[in-house]
Image: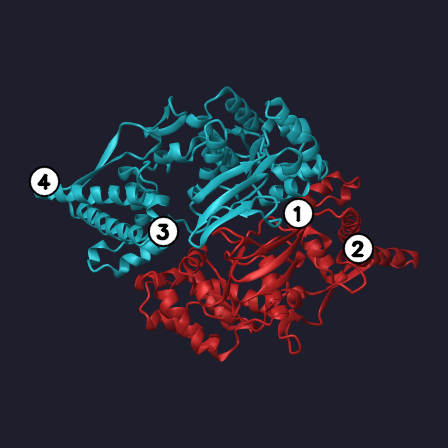
Chain colours: A red, B cyan
Amino acid sequence: MASDSKTDEELARERLIDLAAEFYDQFDDGEIPTMTLPTRTKSNIEYDEDSNVWVYGDRTSTRSANSVRGARKLLKAAYTIEFLARQLEEDRSSTLRELYYLSESWDAEEAHFSDQDESNQLIEDLEIVSEVTREDFHMRPEESGATLMGPLELREQTRRGEREIHCQKDVGEGGYQIPNNPDTIEFLDHDIDFVMCVETGGMRDRLIENGFDDDYNALIVHLKGQPARATRRITKRLRNELDLPVVVFTDGDPWSYRIFGSVAYGSIKSAHLSEYLATPDARFVGIQPQDIVDYDLPTDPLSDSDINALESELEDPRFMSDYWTEQIELQLDIGKKAEQQALAARGLDFVTDEYLPTRLDEMGVI
Amino acid sequence: MASDSKTDEELARERLIDLAAEFYDQFDDGEIPTMTLPTRTKSNIEYDEDSNVWVYGDRTSTRSANSVRGARKLLKAAYTIEFLARQLEEDRSSTLRELYYLSESWDAEEAHFSDQDESNQLIEDLEIVSEVTREDFHMRPEESGATLMGPLELREQTRRGEREIHCQKDVGEGGYQIPNNPDTIEFLDHDIDFVMCVETGGMRDRLIENGFDDDYNALIVHLKGQPARATRRITKRLRNELDLPVVVFTDGDPWSYRIFGSVAYGSIKSAHLSEYLATPDARFVGIQPQDIVDYDLPTDPLSDSDINALESELEDPRFMSDYWTEQIELQLDIGKKAEQQALAARGLDFVTDEYLPTRLDEMGVI
């Protein structure tokens, strides 16, 4: 999201100050200041044919200073913009949680956030109206901690200088730790045939121990459950900049399908960032309900909340394909779910000797 | 836990086979096979004056094949021993979850585990009777993922050869990822004055951004909430092998005191491993109830479960010191708790410019 002539920081700072200037101009013209945002509900997300991801529709909501509640929201926005602009000027960064606590030190008591949901939401609002990502505001999440392992050499720009790291030769068995803002990374060289995102740490370790990354020139991205933005962002960059196929390997349950969905199509919460975070041609190699039948995998019964989640996926625009409809209906029919590590019931090497090679071959990835 | 002449793997394998041989001999002598374990409840953990950690007391429980239930348990133990012995012979490893699923492939249906709690528990039982750690059985946990950052150079023995890594110069901002078995690490060189274990990712990132590791020659260990065994193990090794002071920086609530307690004194669940995992002279630099009063930090009210947890800590042998009694009683009195990031209410640099230097100076660490 950077222009060619300015740094990401300069651009982000400028956009924020433009927003504050807009409030100023509205006051100056004798108008009541307002801020207009797309409505952030499921009914207002649409499939964008050009970019192949889900984006907000045309419906908007307006925050106006014509009520005490609305005026307070805009006051908080103005204080937050000032804090972010200063943070960028000083080349510093902070966490979303620190922002919430920091507001306690602001002189206008009306500007203090009442809880962290409020400050998180405001940062998302500012991302939407300024078209700058949180990462470019230098706002960090609490935890990220996902890792890469595979034939990739990269350069990371850290506060302490550049680091050149090969994600097999220069790291321990734990792999390369993805930084909070992966746009500080430049891809130098690689020997990757495809990128495989893996849901659980146990399976990630299995693939590494079995040498799957080496044997298939795969870059293993550990998702750690629902992936952090940094993990989704680097996956997208690997797809786009290195022109690599991306596959997503998860458990076979509705929550894991959502993990795949958020990698591929983005989420409702971050539909404004789909173009930055989503990898629309990522493909699913997770456990399919059909695998439960074909391989007679150890299973658990579907709980009521699993069934509700599957039924809501049947209505979810991201899962409205023949493949997903068939698999989800089969799963509701058999009433079972299975984890990726359930493949171990056929031996520790089944996943790398049989399961993945068969699936990836059928899909034309290998 | 290794002897000088044998590798950890050889020793672990031998101990396991000794156990199975014991069952064989019991059968051979016409006895009903049994396995005797220390009773694993709070009332059976005691302070060991020699090692300064909490260990099991004298009470024991016996698993005997004189009931169907007991016989099934010993059958499962025999199958698991066979699996582990083969795994060690082949220099492979697996996760606790894989073991649970793998049991489905065993020919005796009576030996299949009914849930993962059962297989996890059996591995702990085997650790206790064999006096070999799970890591030396090559059993991995699901997720670990904690990191180190600071002036430490180490050598990690990976399946793909040795890696020499400096935990500031050779890593990105995410730091060095601790492997599942940190005993594959050798410390080569360092410039560390003290080790600081930090509960949250947000605070870990704050300390790194503010250059605290550089300014104070501190090795920052990210605990990620309740620390994994790998994190506690490497902390203990840093203390013992490099003779370094260890401090633990957490939130100011009863759950965080337990995090400190598990680093320093071990946990009931792993009291058999205290000598391997616990760092008894680790000291607490987390948010104290007194800090909430002195610095007027933003707080949340104590919930009912917080109050219960604090009251149970007053009875916990690990917290029976004047310091902890005073702080916990103060906290119950003020009815409040605070997070480490609440220090941001006094500015982003307060923690590194004021709070930690003052606390560490008072404690004689710097």
Q: Earlier in the sequence, mark 2 or mark 1?
A: 2
Inter-mark Cα distance, 3 to 1: 34 Å
Q: Amino acid at mark 1?
A: Thr
In the image, which disc is placed on residue A95? 1
Q: Amino acid at mark 2?
A: Arg
Q: Nearer the viewer, mark 4 or mark 1?
A: 4
The residue depicted at 33 percent of the width and 34 percent of the height is B41
User: Dot 4 lies on which element?
Assistant: loop
Q: Quadrant of residue A154?
A: bottom right
Q: Amino acid at mark 3?
A: Leu
Q: Which residue is mark 2?
A: A13
In the image, which disc is placed on residue B96? 3
Residue B229, relative to residue B172: is it above or below?
Answer: above
The residue depicted at 50 percent of the width and 31 percent of the height is B242
Q: Are marks 4 and 1 on the same chain?
A: no
Q: Quadrant of residue B27?
A: top left
Q: Which residue is mark 4?
A: B31
Q: Amino acid at mark 4?
A: Glu
Inter-mark Cα distance, 2 to 3: 49 Å
